Amino acid sequence: MGNRVTPAFAQVVYQTVITLTASDQLSAAFAAQTRWIRLGVGGFTTALNGGVKYAVGDGSPTVATVYAALPASGYEYIAVNPGQKVCVRALNADANVLCSITELA
């Protein structure tokens, strides 16, 4: 079993928790000092198809064609630029699960 390394960051902003659905959900624009975000996803009641898809970008990114996936009950550190947003959507249409976004510097 390997060791898990958690990088050390300063928390900048803790955004409002997003309730995931089958539609795109956009975060607020990231603050001027934000260089990373921590995207965390709650557990799903149905393991099959549990997880989210997400995309980071300028303006209003979507997960229609190009996206990354994050499994249920998972989290990920993602490099971002100030002013960008993250778009998230549940893979399972009836998931109704929470997603947290923490901005880090």
Image (spheres, helix red, strand yellow):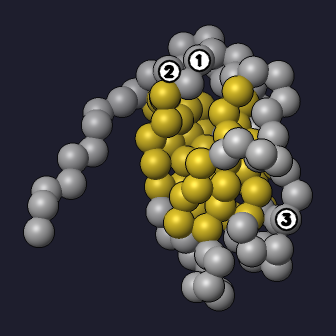
- Comparing labels 3 and 2, the label whose residue is closer to the camera: 3
Q: How far apart are marks 3 and 1 (CA)?
A: 26 Å
Give 14 or 38, whichever is nearer the viewer.
38
Residue assigned mark 1:
81
Residue 27 visible in the shown view: yes
The residue depicted at 47 percent of the width and 55 percent of the height is 75
Q: What element carries label 1?
A: loop
| Residue 68 spot, x, y in % from top left | 59, 48
Which residue type carries mark 2? Arg
Residue assigned mark 2:
35
Q: Distance between the residues labelled 2 and 1?
A: 6 Å
How crowded pointer 2 is (Cα within 10 Å; few <14, some 14-19, many 20+) is rated as: some
**Callout 3 touching callout 2 (CB < 8 Å):** no
Q: Distance between the residues labelled 3 and 2?
A: 28 Å
Which numbered dot is residue 22?
Answer: 3
12 vs 48, left or right, is left
| Residue 56 spot, x, y in % from top left | 66, 33
Which numbered dot is residue 103?
Answer: none
The relative height of residue 13 versus residue 102 in the rendered view (above or below) is above
The residue depicted at 62 percent of the width and 85 percent of the height is 48
Q: Is mark 2 on a helix, strand or loop?
A: loop
**Which quadrant would the C terminus be assigned to in this image?**
top left
Q: Identify the mark nearer the N-term, 3 or 1.
A: 3
**Which quadrant would the N terminus be assigned to in this image?**
bottom left
Q: Identify the mark nearer the N-term, 2 or 1.
A: 2
| Residue 55 spot, x, y in % from top left | 68, 40
Which residue type carries mark 3? Ala
**Callout 3 touching callout 1 (CB < 8 Å):** no
